[in-house]
Image (cartoon, grey):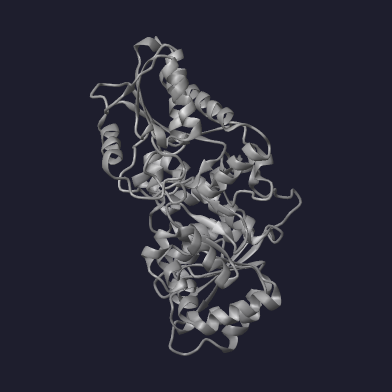
C-alpha cells in the first residue's frame, strides 16, 4: 500500500519556488527533467517495437512554462527520429523566460512553428497549452484548439494537467482536453482525481523531477490518497484472543419493517472483524434478523407513540456499558423513539460513536442534540465519526447540495469543525477529515458501489474498526479504503452494474484473507 499526496496549484507553486529559490535547482533543469519524463512515458506506451520515424506527433504549446515543457518534449521526440510539428499559441513577447529559451533552442534545431492548427492526421498529440495556473474560462482560439485536439483520432498526452481543467477542483473551464494519459510532476494534482477532471485525465502517471520532501518543509501537502493492497493496514488478530477482545459493537438500526439496513450493517461488522454485535431495533424486525444474522444479539423495542422508558431504557443503558463503540442511524427512522435513543447515546455514554443516515438527520434538525453532542465531546473526550452523503451533509450544514458539490473540501472541513468530528463525506470521491487533520481522498472504488445499502456496509466496516480502540481518523480512513477495495473486487466478479451491497460485504471478508 502506498500513500500518494494530492496537491493544489498553490501548494505546487510553493514547492516549485522553494526548489528553485532555496535549494538552487534551476527552473530550466526542472523543465528539462519534466520533458524527459513525458517522452519516457510516450516511448513506453506508444513507441515500443516500432520505427519512431513513422510516428507523426503534434505538440500544442502555450506561452507559459507548461508550453516550455511542451517545446522541450518536441525537441526530444525530434531527437528520437519522430516527425514532429509544433503549434505555439501566444505572442513571442508574452512567453515566459523559460519558454522563450526552449523556443530559441527548438528553432536552432530547425523545427519551424505552425502558424495555424495543422489539418493533418497525427498518431500522438501532446497537450501543453495550460499549466496548473488556469483559473478562467477557455475562450476564442484556445477553445477552438482544444476542440480540434479532441476531434482528432490521435492519442492525447497531457502535460501536468489536461488544458481546461481546474487544478484544485477538477472543474472544466468551458472546454478541456480529453487526454488518454496525463503525465504530472512531483505530486499528483487534486483536479486529476475529482470529477469531472478524472474523466478528462485518463491514466494519471506521476513522475519525479527532483522536487523532493525537502521542498515541502513547513508546508506538507494537505491531502493524500492510498493505493495498493489494504491487507497490511488491517489490525492483527491475537492468537489468544476471544470474541470479546476483538471488539463489541452496539448497533442502533432499523425502524418498523425496515430491517435491511440493520442486517447489512451488522453483517459488515462481523465480516470486518468485530467479535460481537448487539443490534437494537424495532420488535417487528426480530424474526428477519434472527433468520438472516443469528450471530448478532438483539435488543428490541415497540415502535409506539409512548416514549421508550422503564425496563427498555435500563437494557439500553446496560448495552452502552457493554459495548466498545456505538453505531447509530442506518434505517433508524427519525421518530420520537429514535430521537430518544440518540439522546441517551449522547448523554449517557462516552464511547466512540459513528452516526449515519437517520441519526444525522436527527442531529441536523435538533439544535439541542447538537449542543449535547458537543458537550459530550468536550467533557468526555469521546471520538465521533459522521458519515453523510451529499444530501445529509447539506442538511447538517443547512445549505444546498449544489454548494456541497461545488466545494467538497471546504464543506467537509466545515462540518468537521461544526460537529467536532471526523467526517466521511461520501461521494464519487469520498473525503475523510477532521477540522485540522490531513484530508484523505478515496480514489478506489467504482460506480457499482452506488447501490442501495452500500452506505450501511461502510458504517459497519468503520464501526468494526472503531471497536478496536484505534483513533477515529485512522478507523475512518481504513474503513473507507477497505470498503472501496471490496467494491472493486465485487465489480470484478459481478460487473459494475451488477454489484449489490451484500457482494461488497463478502469481498470485505475475502480481502482480509491477504
Residue at the far front: name it.
93
Location of residue 428 in the rendering, given as x and y in whole percent from the top left corner: 42, 52
Q: Please tell me whether residue 384 is drawn above or below residue 437 in the rendered image.
A: below
Q: Please tell me whether residue 195 is drawn above or below residue 400 in the rendered image.
A: above
Residue at the spot x=44%, y=37% of the render? 64
Residue at the spot x=44%, y=16% of the render? 108
Residue at the spot x=40%, y=12% of the render? 52
Q: Quadrant of the C terminus?
A: top right
Residues 385 and 144: in front is 144
Location of residue 16 in the rendering, given as x and y in whole percent from the top left corner: 58, 40
Q: Is residue 119 visible?
A: yes
Residues 33 and 435: in front is 33
Residue at the far left: name it.
119
Location of residue 486 in the rendering, given as x and y in whole percent from the top left corner: 50, 46
Q: Please tell me whether residue 220 is drawn above or below residue 370 in the rendered image.
A: above
Q: Quadrant of the N terminus?
A: top right
Residues 424 and 100: in front is 100
Q: Is residue 48 visible?
A: no
Q: Please tell me whether residue 345 is drawn above or below residue 436 in the rendered image.
A: below
Specify whether 474 is left or right of 139.
right
Amino acid at each position: 500500500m502506498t500513500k500518494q499526496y494530492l496537491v493544489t496549484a498553490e501548494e505546487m507553486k510553493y514547492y516549485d519556488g522553494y526548489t528553485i529559490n532555496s535549494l538552487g535547482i534551476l527552473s530550466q533543469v526542472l523543465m528539462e527533467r519534466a520533458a524527459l519524463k513525458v517522452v519516457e512515458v510516450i516511448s513506453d506506451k506508444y513507441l515500443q517495437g516500432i520505427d519512431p520515424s513513422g510516428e507523426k506527433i503534434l505538440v500544442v504549446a502555450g506561452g507559459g512554462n507548461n508550453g516550455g515543457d511542451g517545446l522541450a518534449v518536441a525537441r526530444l521526440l525530434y531527437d528520437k527520429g519522430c516527425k514532429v510539428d509544433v503549434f505555439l499559441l501566444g505572442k513571442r513577447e508574452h512567453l515566459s523566460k523559460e519558454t522563450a529559451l526552449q523556443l530559441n533552442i527548438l528553432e536552432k534545431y530547425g523545427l519551424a512553428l505552425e502558424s495555424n492548427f495543422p489539418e493533418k492526421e497525427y498518431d500522438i498529440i501532446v497537450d501543453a497549452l495550460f499549466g496548473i495556473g488556469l483559473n478562467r474560462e477557455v475562450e476564442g482560439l484556445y477553445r477552438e484548439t482544444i476542440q480540434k485536439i479532441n476531434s482528432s483520432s490521435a492519442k492525447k498526452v497531457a502535460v501536468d494537467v489536461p488544458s481546461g481543467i481546474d487544478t484544485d477542483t477538477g472543474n472544466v473551464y468551458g472546454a478541456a482536453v480529453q487526454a488518454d494519459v496525463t503525465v504530472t510532476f512531483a505530486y499528483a494534482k487534486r483536479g486529476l482525481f475529482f470529477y469531472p477532471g478524472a474523466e478528462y485525465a485518463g491514466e494519471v502517471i506521476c513522475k519525479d523531477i527532483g522536487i523532493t520532501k525537502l521542498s515541502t518543509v513547513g508546508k506538507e501537502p494537505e491531502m493524500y490518497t492510498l493505493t495498493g493492497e489494504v491487507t497490511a493496514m488491517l489490525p492483527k488478530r491475537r492468537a489468544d484472543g476471544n470474541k470479546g477482545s476483538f471488539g463489541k459493537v452496539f448497533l442502533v438500526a432499523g425502524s418498523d419493517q425496515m430491517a435491511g439496513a440493520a442486517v447489512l450493517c451488522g453483517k459488515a461488522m462481523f465480516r470486518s472483524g468485530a467479535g460481537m454485535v448487539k443490534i437494537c431495533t424495532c420488535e417487528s424486525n426480530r424474526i428477519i434478523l434472527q433468520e438472516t444474522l443469528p450471530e448478532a444479539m438483539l435488543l428490541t423495542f415497540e415502535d409506539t407513540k409512548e416514549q421508550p422508558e422503564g425496563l427498555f431504557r435500563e437494557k439500553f443503558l446496560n448495552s452502552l456499558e457493554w459495548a466498545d463503540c456505538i453505531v447509530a442511524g442506518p434505517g433508524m427512522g427519525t421518530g420520537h423513539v429514535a430521537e430518544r435513543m440518540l439522546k441517551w447515546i449522547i448523554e449517557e455514554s462516552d464511547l466512540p460513536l459513528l452516526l449515519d443516515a437517520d441519526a444525522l438527520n436527527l442531529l441536523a434538525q435538533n439544535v439541542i442534540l447538537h449542543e449535547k453532542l458537543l458537550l459530550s465531546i468536550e467533557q468526555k473526550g469521546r471520538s465521533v465519526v459522521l458519515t453523510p452523503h451529499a444530501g445529509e451533509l447539506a442538511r447538517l450544514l443547512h445549505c444546498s447540495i449544489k454548494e456541497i458539490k461545488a466545494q467538497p473540501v471546504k464543506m467537509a472541513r466545515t462540518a468537521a469543525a461544526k460537529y467536532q468530528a471526523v467526517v466521511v463525506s461520501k461521494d464519487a470521491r469520498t473525503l475523510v477529515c477532521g477540522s485540522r487533520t490531513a484530508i484523505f481522498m478515496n480514489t478506489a472504488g467504482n460506480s457499482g458501489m452506488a447501490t442501495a445499502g452500500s452506505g450501511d456496509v461502510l458504517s459497519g466496516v468503520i464501526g468494526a474498526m472503531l471497536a478496536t480502540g484505534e483513533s477515529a481518523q485512522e478507523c475512518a480512513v481504513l474503513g473507507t479504503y477497505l470498503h472501496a477495495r471490496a467494491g472493486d473486487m465485487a465489480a470484478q466478479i459481478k460487473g459494475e452494474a451488477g454489484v449489490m451491497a451484500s457482494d461488497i460485504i463478502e469481498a470485505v471478508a475475502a480481502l482480509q484473507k491477504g
